[in-house]
Amino acid sequence: MSVKALNLVSSSANFPSNWNGTAWQRLDEWLNKAQEIVNANYANNFPGLIPSVLEMTDGRRYVRIDSIVSNGAGQRTVWAFVDKFTGDVLKPATYKAPAKHARGNLFDSDGGVGKLTPYGPAYLKG
């Protein structure tokens, strides 16, 4: 488990009892793959800039994934939400709430990263 996941585990008692080692591993792998997507975008399109860093923040029902810009100002924006009970990956609707429909799941065959973009989960195509 990464340092980010360990810090989240040690700082919270809000996780459901069914969150075992496999669930934590899936969340950790998902966050690492999401960070790789962000890093690749910066390397290809903005080579002179430092990539933003994805960080997990615990909530009652969701883990909020924030994107922190490393430009000295420390600007923080919501990048995604992960439902702690189902493993659903959700696009943010506001700073504190996700949009209604899942864009993937940590337990899917692709690990929930199939619909991720460098800017967060993709919009649903109508």
Image: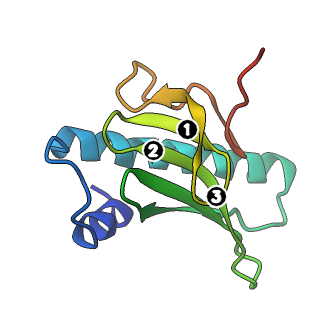
Secondary element at tag 3: strand
- Asked whether 74 or 19 is in front, the reply is 19
Q: Quadrant of the image for the C terminus? A: top right
| Label annotation for residue 78 | 3
Residue drawn at the location 73% of the way across and 68% of the way down: 50
Q: Is residue 123 above or below residue 84?
A: above
- Within 10 Å of the Cα at label 2, are there few (<14), some (14-19), or many (20+) other Cα atoms? many
Amino acid beneath label 1:
Leu
Q: Quadrant of the image for the N terminus? A: bottom left
C-alpha span from label 3 to label 1: 11 Å
Of callouts 3 and 1, which one flags the residue occurring earlier in the amino acid sequence? 3
Q: Residue 28, percent across and down?
A: 36, 49
| Label annotation for residue 82 | 2
Q: Are marks 1 and 2 in contact (CB under 8 Å)?
A: yes
Of callouts 1 and 2, which one flags the residue occurring earlier in the amino acid sequence? 2
Q: Residue 18, percent across and down?
A: 15, 41
